[in-house]
Amino acid sequence: EVQLVESGGGLVQPGGSLRLSCAASEFTFSDHYMDWVRQAPGKGLEWVGRSTNKLNSYTTYYAASVKGRFTISRDDSKNSMYLHMNSLQTDDTAVYYCVRDFGAGWGQGTLVIVSS
Amino acid sequence: QSVLTQPPSVSAAPGQKVTISCSGSSSNIGNNHVSWYQQLPGTAPKSLIYDSNKRTSGIPDRFSASKAGTSATLGISGLQTGDEADYYCGAWDTSLSGEVFGGGTKLTVL
């Protein structure tokens, strides 16, 4: 069974940085597109960004709200994807989900709280 | 506000059928596939439909979906209390070069 496990969330001050990790298992990680999607407390889903697969050169795309502050990277040797978040703002507070292949599989999420 | 438009809530009695609409534009639904997700209270979203009308493995055929022009519809028949959840549509937006979601629809099974 496909598994996606996020980690790295926590409390961070405004202006701070955090790195989220997504550990994948039971599929060939390099073959698949991967997204980050977030959900603020009590709100709907918001797409954060995407990494295409190896065949498509791991091209990345970002939502306008995070472009220039967030970066997606992958380490296929560790079957892992990362979300590097800088200049965090209070409205970045959300549960962050790791998502495979256009929503086919979701992790359980990791909570990021940006607060002083 | 969301790029894709969904009704905030729908409701129906057990055993009945309900539909949830998702309205977009030519840059998203009009020219790209639509996905539908179910989010039960306190859990992560789960894929129901991909490629506009294909059920994800393990999803019962009570769930169906269609797309016409710049709108999509999710149908749920034989409603059960366990179907009470938030439902989201999503699609790639070519103009934004990003995935967009609807604001979500809360289904209540009366």
Image (spheres, helix red, strand yellow):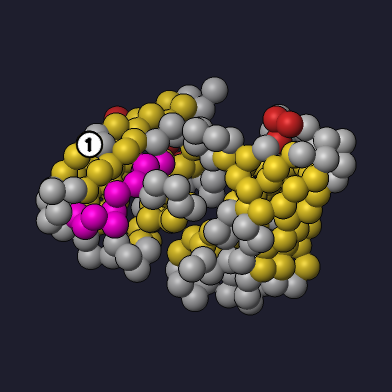
* Residue A15, quarter of the rendered image: bottom left
In reply to whether residue A99 is colored magenta, the answer given is: no
Give the magenta range: A88-97
Name the foreground residue: A86 vs A52. Answer: A86
Q: How many marks?
A: 1
The chain to which mark 1 is attached is A
Q: Position of residue A20 (x, y in %)?
A: 26, 40
Q: Position of residue B96 (x, y in %)?
A: 45, 72
| Amino acid at circle 1 | Gly
Q: Residue at x 61, y 66 (%)?
A: B5
Residue A97 visible from this viewpoint: yes
Q: Position of residue A92 (x, y in %)?
A: 29, 54
Whether residue B14 sits left or right of residue A28 in the image: it is right
Kind of element beneath mark 1 = strand
Q: Residue at x 27, y 42 (%)?
A: A112
Q: Residue at x 63, y 40 (%)?
A: B85
* Location of mark 1 (residue): A10
Q: Residue at x 23, y 65 (%)?
A: A68
Whether residue B85 sits left or right of residue B61 in the image: it is left
Q: Residue furthest front?
A: B110
